[in-house]
Structure formats: C-alpha cells, structure tokens
Amino acid sequence: MNTLNPYLPFSSKILEVIKHTEKEYTFRMEFKGEVKPGQFFEVSIPKYGEAPISVSGIGENFVDLTIRRVGRVTNEVFERYEGQSLLLRGPYGNGFDVDLYRDCEVVVVAGGTGVSPVRGVIQALSDMPDASDKYVVAGFRSPEDMLFRDDLKAWDSKLNLTLTVDGAPEGYQGNIGLVTKYIEGLPLKEPSKARAVVVGPPPMMKFTIIELKKKGFTDANITVSHERKMCCGLGKCGHCRVNDHYICLDGPVFSYEVAKDFVD
Amino acid sequence: MGYVLNKESFSDLVSALLKDYRIFAPVLKKGAGRFTDVDCVIYDEVKDASEIELEKKSDYASKEFLTPLSETLLYFTEEEVKEADLCEKKVLIFGRSCDLNGLKRLDQIYLDNGLAKDPFYKRRRDLIKPVLIGCGHSYDNCFCVSMDSNRFEEGYAFSVDLIDGEIHSNVLDKEFDSFFKAAAGAKELDVTPRFVTENEVKVEIPDEIPGRIITDDLWDEYTTRCINCGRCNFVCPTCTCYTMQDVFYSDNGRVGERRRVSASCMVDGYTDVAGGGQYRRKNGERMRFKVLHKISDFKKRFGYQMCVGCGRCDDICPEYISFSNIINKVNDAVKKEVNS
Amino acid sequence: MANLDVNVGKLKKNAFRYSKVRGETASRIRIPGGVIDSASMAKVVEIAEKYGTGVINITNRQGIEIPGIKLEDVDKVNAEVQEVIDALRINQPEKGKGYPSSGTRNVIACPGARLCPFGCYDTTAFAQKMENNIYPNDRHVKIAFTGCSNDCGKVRMADFGIIGMTEPQYNKDRCVACGACVDYCKRRSVGALQLVNGKVVRDTDKCIGCGVCVVYCPTRAWTRSREHYFRVVLLGRTGKKNPRLAEDFIKWADEESILKMVKNTYAYIEEYIDPNAVEHKEHIGYIVDRTGFEEFKKWIFEGVELGPKAEVNDRIYWGGKNYAKYGG
C-alpha cells in the first residue's frame, strides 16, 4: 500500500471487545504510534464507509475505540470480533494535553458518549499521585446507558467522582439529575485558577459552561471537545468546519476562549 | 509571444495540442439545461476546436476536472484496496480569470490546509496547465472586479481571445510557442489578453464582520426563499467540499468502491453526525454559513477572499437569490452596526 | 329587422353561432395553440366594437366568440376577420369568406415549453401543425395538447389528447446523490426514482416522462432526451350520453405518427359515421363503441410506423357515466 496516500487505511487487529451496553462496545485495537486522548481515528470499512471514532483509551500497544452502533459503518464494525481486524486511518486532531491538569484543581464534566474522548484524561488524573483536587462529573441518560462501569468504580476510589443519570427506574440508588446540577456544589478552593474539561452533547456543554462560569471559571481555563461530521480527518472535505476552524485539524479539543465564538 | 489565428489555424493548433494533451473546456450542450430546448455550457473533454465555447460564460465552473462531481478513489476486492487509475496524459484547462483565480482556492484546501496534501487532487493538479479565456466584456452577475479576480496575468500556458472570428493568443509558457508556430496561418503579433475592468454589479465587503451579523435578521428571508438545492455550490469555482461514498456492487457484494462526490453546505445531510445530530437546519443559517465562508471565514484562515465574483451562483439560482446582493446587505448591516 | 332568410346550416359551418337572440349571431375565431398576436387581438376588439356589443367571450377551447353580431353583417365580418385568419395561418380555400368549416374544433394547447418550466415540447407549434394537418373539416374532432403530465390542457376530455414526455437521460458521473430528483419525483410525480449505491435508478415502467427530475437536478446529471416524446390518450368526451376521460393509448409516441393517426381518423369517420346522426355530428368515441376498438386501430395505424420506444396499449376500456344505458 502506498504510505503517502493518507486516504489509505492500515489494518489493525482487534485485541479485545468490551461490551458496555447493547449499543456501545469498546474495541481494543492494536496500535503502536503516538496518540493522545481526545484524538480520533477514522474507522474505515470498505464498501460501507468511514466513521470518526475518538480514542477512549491508550495503552502501550493499543488504542481503545468506543463505538456506538448507530449506522451503516458502525453496524458493520459490530459484526467483527476479537482476532479479526479493522481498517483505520489516523490518529487525527489535536487531543488533550494532560500535563496541563497536573498541578491544579480540575473538573471534568462528561455526558454520555462524551465520556469516551475524556476517558484517557480521567485515567491520567486518577493515576496522579494526589488526585484529591480532581473532580469528575459523569452523566448518562439512564443506568443502562452507563459506559466504562469498571473504570467508574476504579476512578471513584482515586478521585472525586459524581455519577449521575438523567432518569432511572424507581428504586435506583444513585444520583438522578443533569450534570449541571452538580457543578455548583463542587468544593473548589480557587475556581478562577481551576481548569475544566467539558465534553458531551451541545446543549449539555452549553449549560455546563454557564454553570462553570457562574462558579468563577475563566474562558481560558475551560477546554471543550467538539463533535462534528468529520469525513476525511484531513481538512479537505469541509463538513466539520465551524467559522474559520476545521474541527478535524484545529480540534476537536479547543480552549473555550476560541470555541465560545463558534456558531454552526 | 503573441499570435493571431483564424478559425482554421486555431483548429490546427487544437488538433496538434490534442496529441500531447487532453483538453477540458466549456462546451455548449444543446438542450442540456433544466428546461426544454434550453442549452447549458458545461466543462467537458473536447476532441475538436469547434466544441470549445469561447463566447458564453459557462454555467458550471472549470473545477470539474480537478474536483469531479463524482470520482472513484479506491476499489475494494476481498483482500485488496486499489487506488483508481487516472490517465496520465497532460491536461489543458480553458478558464476565464475567475476560474483560474479559483484554482488557488482549490489548491489552498486540497494541498495546503493541514499537513496532508490530497493525493487524488494532487495527481490531477500536476497534470494541468491553465489556458486563459480572455473576457471582452463583463457578463450578467459578474463582480470579479470587486473581488480582485478580474485579472489572471501569470501562470497560464497561453490565452485565447475570440475577436471578430479570430483567436488572439498570448503565449506565456514557451513550450507552446512551437505549437503556435506550426499552426498554418498563425500570424505573430503582440497580444494582450482582455480583462474586464468594470462590472455592472459591485460589492463592498467590510474588513471586519462582527459576530453579531451571524444573528442579524437579514438571513431570515432565505429560510423561506432558498430551496437548499445546492446549485450555488456546485457551480462555484471555489467550493471544495465533498462527501465519501462507499458502495458494494449489487451483482457481487464482495467487491466495491469508495468514491467522493461534491457536497453542498446548503443540502440536507451536510452536517449530519452519527446518531441523528444535525447543525444548521434552517436554510437561512446555511446561507449565512456559506456567505460568511466566502467573504470572511476563509480570509481569516488564509488571508485572502474565497469568492472570485464569477456570479455563477446568481446565474443559476432558481429562486433568484443574489449572492452579490447578500454581500452588500451584510456590508450595510455592518455599517449600521458601526454607526449605531 | 329585415325579412331574414338565412341558411342556418351554412351559417354554422361558416363558424357563426346560432344564437338564442333572434336575428343575432356570434363570430367564432379559432386560435390554434391558444396563441394570438396582439394586432389580431386588436382586430377582434375592433370587430366586437363595430359589429358586436363591445363584449368578447373567451371560449373553453381557447377560441373567441364575438356576440351580438347582426345576421345581415355576416359578410362584412367575414371580410374584416380575414386579416386575423391570415395572421393565424388558418387553411382557407377562398379568402374573404370567413372560416370554411367548424366541425373540427380549435386545436388547443397549454402554454408548453415556450413559457412553462415543466413543458416538454412546444405545444403551440405542434397544435398549429396539427391544425394545418386537419383543418378545414366538418367532422367533429377535438384535439388537445399539453406540455407535460400535469395536463393543464385537460387533454383527457378530448378525442386525441397529446401529453408531452421527455426521456430522462442520466449521467452518473455528474450525480452527487443529493437526492433532489428522488425527493421531487416522489412528492411531485410518481416516485419512479430510487438511490441505489449512491446513484439513482429509474423505474422505467413507472416513469411517466414528466421531466421533474431534470428540472430539479442541480448538477445536470439528469437532462432531457434530444427527442420529444408524447403520451397519446384517446377518446375522452363530455356530453349527455356517456361522458368519460380519455384513456392511455401510446406511451413514447413520436410527432409524425401522431399527425398521421389523427389524419387517418377522418377516413375512419367517413366510413363508419351514423348516417342519421343529428347534424351529421357524432363523437368518434360513439363510432368506436359500435365498430370496436380493433377496427379503429386498424384504420388509424394505416401507414404509421411508430418509433422503437413506443408502447401501445392494445386493449382499452373506458369508464365514465353512462346515462343513456343506466339513466341519470
């Protein structure tokens, strides 16, 4: 294969398939190159198409791709199992700079599949020697929609995790309510110097940022990750452009200072 | 070096060129318009000089060789991925100043936005040499002078100006002198390609477009007037967006292809993300997105205006929406904003 | 009123109406294809003011009637109307004598491709050609042209209804799968298009050749066929006995065959018309009801060579209300 052609995918072995819900699996893919949390790959299924999937975990010889079964391409991905391979292109985009979050209070707010792109960030936070000033608010639609259950348990023991669901059947023991509800109560010492990461559906991001700013966060200290239609990942196809930014090139991770002016 | 050729010698010239080059030029297609017995000028590969339409402004832009409306990129067999072949013969593309200025915009995106160069674009780009069609006059809806793209003075192989039945050519690329010298009846003469210096339609673009313009109500009327057909994008010499399409052949599902087709930011589906998310549902929002790209967002990123003022979007809009008029509306709205 | 002695049969044949107002008539101006130049229109106005009551009736079949003309002025009106007849190029054996017959009705047409975005051919030109092909004739024949399947010309009420068609030509290399044609075909027409593997597939059995896909295609992937095609519908009629809509006869017919078939129809009528028909006038449909459709087909197909695309409907069953048989 011509390595000069960025449209040609490479083959990657499926090391493991982790099932979260009926519709959401994590595919642990063999990968040895450089990659950061928040970057994405194009999963390329010949004859079916390509889908941008953000990196939800990184290991020495693998990347995790958490995939939601919502269309032609992802349906086809779900037909594959351990030992088989998938074609990938990437990684694309800028990703999160985890070092930024080392020596300060940090709040990560993630909603639904938005947890995938920040999973690597949360993992890094929880691995830090003292994670007592790291806060994570993770929200899912319902208890059944929860992703990364094992991780959530592990994180809970290392950092300050608030887990919530939008709605739940009667008798549910955990938090019920939108993520925005839990921001005001975070016991931050110096919110104006704290950093935040917000990833999730557009309305969730909008209202979370309003809450964060009420609490004293500066625009520059808020980081967001955007999801758009990223067809090529190379800045060519144009679908992901917002204002003068190409999400696939300049993002998907942006300082809110820049992203606040985004108008679709 | 300049030359004047009569019809026959131009025909000779084209025949000689066709031995070394494929020629893509505007061609008048009889009855190919939307309506019965209405013609359409579209770019196509020509096999004879008489096919080349030098008088009428083309309805569709010259970009179609470089960025075909539909192009197969990869073929898939069970185990193999194969790049589609492309004829390696060199290509001449006839275009007016607007079209040829448009090339720079296409290059900007496909070769110079992000680190990767688009190889499928580049292999076509590397084949082409532009041929300038001079403009003896401005056409309906042209506003190239306002967009500073009425001239294209460097980088063309040779020019062609049809004046009183004769072709006037200025040859910039020395490689082509021999072709002209060999064309029977070609007279050597100093030739300057004709450029338009004034258009009836003029636009004024504010240097800074404040963010508030995004929410201005000037866009609202297009929510109902625009039918989001995308013609304005498909005819635009500077629109580059595409969508990937994967298919498997119906007679053999194990074999298939990946192709890309031109996309329009006006047409439904452009922003659809997996799971049903969609941005810019209203046509007025899509119009704003398109217009501000052409006259502001592209410039913010690359330092010069995207729109070349060819007016083809106005020519073709079935709903009589005038893009140049929108630019002036934006300008008025910005002025009002500054003054208040 | 003078002692009027008028041959009413001749009067009617001369395209003047038998009026309920005693001593008066109305001059009937035929306007084949529904297009008249403004000078002729001015002449009509002049006649109406000079001989009529200053009133002009626009008829259902795109003609004009100038009412209130005194029967004694018929010759004068005939002389004056000559320039209108000339301008509209109406066949006429003798100048200055008005219209030579009125049985074969004005040939009508919707605006068609001269004006209408959906029109598949120049309806006016074809109507004028048809008029020239069959007029003058005393036989009661109604022919109507419409540009597309919208049938704004209401041709299904005529003996011969001609509906314009185009055969959509698809250039897959220009198709970007925007879906406009599929969507509009479904919403505006019959839903004959489908996106398969990113390209459009046309159900040729379903397609009615309306050209909606061509009108809405933003990239010229769909264009019109060079040839103009027609759907011929047969033997619709209004009236007291058995009013009914015309039924489909030929799909993808050509112009020449249509001209011939209509011309042939007159010989068939001469052969089979009821000799006792009131005023020697009988809708062709009633004749066909007697002779059978096969016989009619045999006559009209005489010397006709349909194109390779033509699809002929061999058996036709008309519906409609039959008051003569079942009462009203």
Image (cartoon, coloured by chain):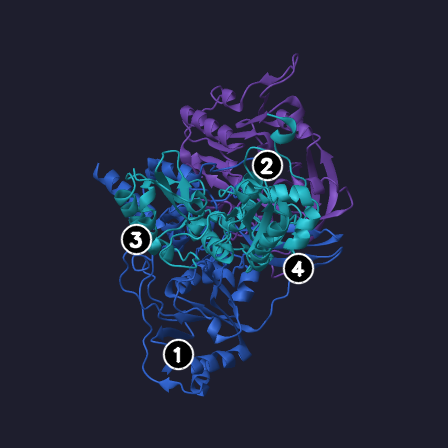
Image colour for chain B is: blue
Q: Please name the residue that numbered disc 3 is placed on.
A: C39
Q: Which mark is residue C308?
A: 4
Viewer-side label of 4, 3: 3
Percent position (x, y) of residue C11?
41, 45
Viewer-side label of 2, 4: 2
Tags 1 and 4 on a common chain: no
Per the model, the C-alpha gap separating discs 1 and 4 is: 51 Å
Tags 1 and 2 on a common chain: no
Viewer-side label of 1, 2: 2
Q: Please name the residue that numbered disc 1 is placed on.
A: B171
Per the model, the C-alpha gap separating discs 2 and 4 is: 30 Å
Q: Earlier in the sequence, mark 3 or mark 2?
A: 3
Q: B91 or B3, which is in the foreground? A: B3
Tags 3 and 2 on a common chain: yes
Q: Are marks 3 and 2 in contact (CB under 8 Å)?
A: no
Check the residue under mark 2 and report the chain it is in: C
Check the residue under mark 4 and report the chain it is in: C
Q: A64 or C270, which is in the foreground? A: C270
Q: Which chain is purple?
A: A
Q: Is residue B148 above or below residue A81?
A: below
Q: Which chain is cyan?
A: C
Classify mark 1: residues with Cα within 10 Å, few (<14), some (14-19) or many (20+). many
Q: Please name the residue that numbered disc 2 is placed on.
A: C244
Check the residue under mark 1 and report the chain it is in: B
Label 3 secondary element: helix
Q: B114 or B10, which is in the foreground? A: B10
Left or right: C45 in relation to A69: left
Mark 3 residue type: Ala
Label 1 secondary element: loop
Mark 4 residue type: Pro
Viewer-side label of 1, 3: 3
